[in-house]
Image: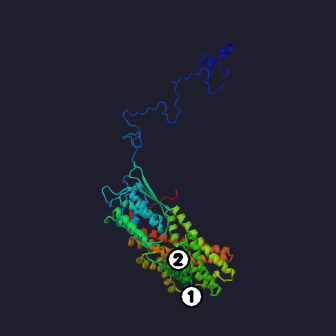
Amino acid sequence: MTQAEDRKPRSDEARTTYDPEITSEFAIPAGLEVSRGGGEPETTSEFAVPSGLHTRQPPATEAEGSAFTLPSTYSAQDAPPAFTPATGVPTVSLIKDAPWQDRMRTMLRMPVTERPAPEPVQRAEEGGPAIPRVLDLTLRIGELLLAGGEGAEDVEAAMFAVCRSYGLDRCEPNVTFTLLSISHQPSLVDDPVTASRTVRRRGTDYTRLAAVFRLVDDLTDPETHVSLEEAYRRLAEIRRNRHPYPGWALTLASGLLAGSASVLVGGDVLVFVAAALGAMLGDRLAWLCAGRGLPEFYQFTVAAMPPAAMGVAFALAHVGVAGSAVVTGGLFALLPGRALVAGVQDGLTGYYITASARLLEVMYFFVGIVTGVLIVLYFGVKVGGQLNPDAALIVSQRPVVQIVASMLLSLTFAVLLQQERSTVVWVTLNGGVAWSVYGAMHVAGGISPVASTAVAAGLVGLFGQLLSRYRFASALPYTTAAIGPLLPGSATYFGLLNMAQNQVDKGLVSLANAASLAMAIAIGVNLGSEISRLTLRIGSAGKRRAAKRTRGF
């Protein structure tokens, strides 16, 4: 044996006891007895059962645990107290005579577990219709409503109503500005079925919108049996229907709208004719740009130039305030009041993505209008046009003439929106009421124009909702055209005129005033609609309101 082999330790005990070179902190000190394991490392997991704790072992015949089996430590005798109150869980009762919009909106605003079970009424064949076809029909109906300018909450309510009318429970519709999706889960253990559809083209046709509402109303009516094939057939007819008014009628309506708006701000017969001609020329140019495939931004820019050119021509002819009235009337026919009201309504009801997209669309349209008017006003100022921004303060008070002009403005606005002829009379009267309230508060009472506009728009929304509930239709045909006389056309024009004359501070103040008036219109319409719903008997869930939302946490 060599000397090196003699120095080699012969066992672990010898190494622990006699080798002085081992200095590791993991070495076992001399004299400490440690029990030897069976070859397996000791369990150090935090999920290990501590020593001394005895647990009940499951029998050998028991199946592997799942999410639906009770825990091993659960005992029926020592069960925790139930969370059900002594008075029981309040049930949700919905008034069946209420319009389907309100009933579906109430259920959409409550948790899924608290929604009442559907009462299937549409059964065309044994076992009910196929789920994918029902979802496809729901998406197609939602596409028509969203493309027609309906609010996101009303679109979801219609989609939810279609699904429940065919007995599909656990449906969750989702609406954004360009995408609709719906998901249906038959039960907690079944895979959900999801479908989506993209909205690529938008068009303003309230006649088609009213027809879709009638279809949904028939589907939700328990006394009316509409099979799936019949619903598809009616939907195809709605798509194929032509607009109720031809193109020349729309051009004439835009001219009459601009002329009526110019009368509201102090114009006479000559101003009426000039504003009408400028608006009609701008409308024809916009149609030409649309036929060439140009985006709507450039269509609004081109359409805003002829009315502004008419105003500059009146200023060069030294007619005075008439030039401002002509430009203001032309702007009334272009301001996107419909998209603004829909965007603010989506934001107030919690659909922030859709609201942001709609308001961004409004901003682009407004920038297009600003660009077209500023180009013309800039060259008008350069050639010596004396455009006076303070001329808007000199407006004669002609209540009868202005009320008639406001009613004509609402009527022509309804024609531009392709409304049904049966709704034109109602919206015309609603527009006259709106201007009468605004004039009584602002002109006679001296109240702020923003507050006066908000109150008048609130009445428009209130009457529009009541009329829509009376006729079981959408509220848009009764409210959108009625807010036409309240649009901030004069404030917008004079803000642009100040900016064209290098008076940026005054221009920004005037544009901020126009934005305040626009927000007052949108909020007033939505508030009036909500007030009308408060007076309707929809249903309740005990002391827990179905429409209650979170408070930010």
Quick one: SS at disc 1?
Answer: helix
- Please name the colour scheme applied to the rendered image: rainbow
Could you say which is closer to the camera, residue 315 or residue 118? 315
Confirm whether residue 114 shows in the render: yes
Residue type marked 1: Leu
Query: In the figure, 507 relative to 35: above or below?
Result: below
Crowding at dot 1, Cα within 10 Å, few <14 / some 14-19 / many 20+, comes out as few
Q: Residue 441 location, x and y as percent?
A: 52, 79
Q: Name the quadrant containing residue 115.
A: bottom left
Residue topped by disc 1: 270
**Residue visible at 45% across and 79% down in the picture:** 428
The quarter of the rendered structure image containing the N terminus is: top right
The alpha-carbon separation of the residues under discs 1 and 2 comes to 23 Å
Q: Name the quadrant containing residue 263.
A: bottom right
Crowding at dot 2, Cα within 10 Å, few <14 / some 14-19 / many 20+, comes out as many
Residue type marked 2: Leu
In the rendered structure, which disc, 1 or 2, sits on the residue that comes first in sequence?
1
Query: In the figure, 547 relative to 256: above or below?
Result: above
Q: In this view, does 521 lie to the left or right of 171?
A: right
Residue lying furthest top in this view? Answer: 1
Q: Residue 553 location, x and y as percent?
A: 52, 56
Q: Residue 448 location, x and y as percent?
A: 56, 76
Confirm whether residue 332 shows in the render: no
Residue topped by disc 2: 486
Could you say which is closer to the camera, residue 88 or residue 48? 48
